[in-house]
Image: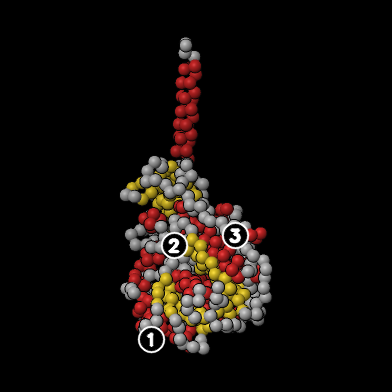
Amino acid sequence: MQSVYVAGVAITKFGKDPRTLSEIFCDAARSALGNAESPEVDAIYIGTMNPEEFTGDSNIASLIADAIGLGGVPAVRIETASSAGAAALMAGFQAIASGYYRRVLVLAGEKMTHLSTSATTRILAEVIDRRDRQCGATMPALAAMITEKYGQKFRLSESRLQNILCQVALKNHANGARNPMAQFQRAITREAYFASKFVATPLRLYDCSPITDGAAGVILTSEKTDVCLAGVGQGTGPLGLQDRDTFTSFAATKIAAARAYRMAETSPQGIDFAEVHDAFTPFEIINSEDLGFFPPGKAGEAVLDGKTALDGKLPINPSGGLKARGHPVGASGLAQVVEVVKRLRGAGVSKREFKRGLTQSIGGLAANNFVTILQRADAPVVQNLWPPNGAPIARPQKVRAAPAREIEEGIIETFTILYVTPDGFLPPLALALIRAPDGRLVMAQGEDETELKIGQEVFLRRVDGVWLFTVKSQLQKVQEAFMKLFQRKAVATAKDNRSGEPK
């Protein structure tokens, strides 16, 4: 396999950009080509999530190739939801590694800020399972439900969980304040974090990445430079939350990480810093554990201890991450690579010399994920592969979907109260993942505003294709218990009567 190196890189200023998507792409392309030794490329790979709905532009590969003055050069558009930028990089990597091309331009971008929040929320929700959307679920709602389950699994009190999420937000905004290309360039305080409104409990406004415009560009080449792509990996997982066997880990990340570590012949201990997908603050915690940086349930403690801060043992999201740098969905996976390359080449305020960096990008609700390892040409070899002891790569197990009927009750597996709802749904909206008696899961919408808890018993009914749930009252539980007791006594009495009959 041909080695793949990085030549020029570029990133536009993230935030609200008055230019068209095409103009933003052109800015990134020209800057990347200008930073490379040669403007000649054999092909163009473009990552973008949904320009059709965000801007009304389709056939985007041809549009961009023509706009940047590279008409005639082969161009292709790649889409894997919010990991599209990382997917485009992998496609470019494969083209060089195979020997088919010598030099390619990888671009990724999105324009989102010109639309209303409700319209953008609707478009972003299209990447999640249709059954979840029918109940009014959005990406923040599902992320909140994952967070609630994470706190319950690792026995985190509400205050402990909130402090962990707050610290992630504070850290990344402080890092973003040092990044001139970040959307948010001002640190926040604990007071500001806790004063921010809930988007979907337990996630607040400062737990969610912003709506952003921006683009990034990378030149990949077979000619040796100071930075190479040492390892790349991709993994997929179930689209729907109700089809998963775990909610506090992302199998797609573990698969991608194992492949990237093995290709790079390294391990989590060989990584100097990382840019991980923190579209929501709890995702930084979960991703850090899935990448092997910390044991399950321990990444939050590491954040509180300062281990992932800019001057910590393992800086995570020194650029500010998606949380503060911004999240133009199609661009983020490639923007992470640009940030890592810049730091490997000595940019940034850190006094440490970084040799090897990692990026991790999530597509949708962690259904199509990528891990990329980049290193300096003089990086030391770390013979410590991952997973340990050559363990096989675990693949996600899909839970059997619930049928359209035959479920009348269940138990709350996890839940959220959604305060920023998509069009057609009024806030506050109660949503819960309900486990049926046979173990199957359904996403359901609450019929009242009862205080919810994991483990509560609920009644279920289906109306117009949507599951609705009502929390059982204490009286109803007592009545059910008496009913079951009477039924058991009746069965026992009938059995005794039959046994006493003459034969």
Q: Quadrant of the N terminus?
A: bottom right
Badge 2 is on which residue?
A: 139
Q: Do we see residue 450 in this rendering?
A: no
How packed is label 1: few (under 14 Cα within 10 Å), some, or many (20 or more)?
few
Image coordinates of residue 138 in percent, x first then y, are 42, 61
Q: Callout 1: helix, strand or loop?
A: loop
Closer to the observer: label 3 or label 2? 2
Image coordinates of residue 417 in percent, x first then y, are 45, 56
Name the N-terminal-most of marks 3 and 2: 2
Cα distance, mark 1 to mark 3? 54 Å
Name the N-terminal-most of marks 1 and 2: 1
Image coordinates of residue 145 in percent, x first then y, are 49, 56
Q: Residue at x 63, y 60 (%)?
A: 390
The kind of residue tagged 1 is Gly
Q: Callout 2: helix, strand or loop?
A: helix
The kind of residue tagged 2 is Met
Q: Residue at x 49, y 81 (%)?
A: 102
Name the N-terminal-most of marks 1 and 3: 1
Hey, which quadrant is residue 315 in on the image? bottom right
Badge 3 is on which residue?
A: 160
Hey, which quadrant is residue 376 in on the image? bottom right
Image coordinates of residue 133 in percent, x first then y, are 38, 57
Tag shown at residue 69: 1
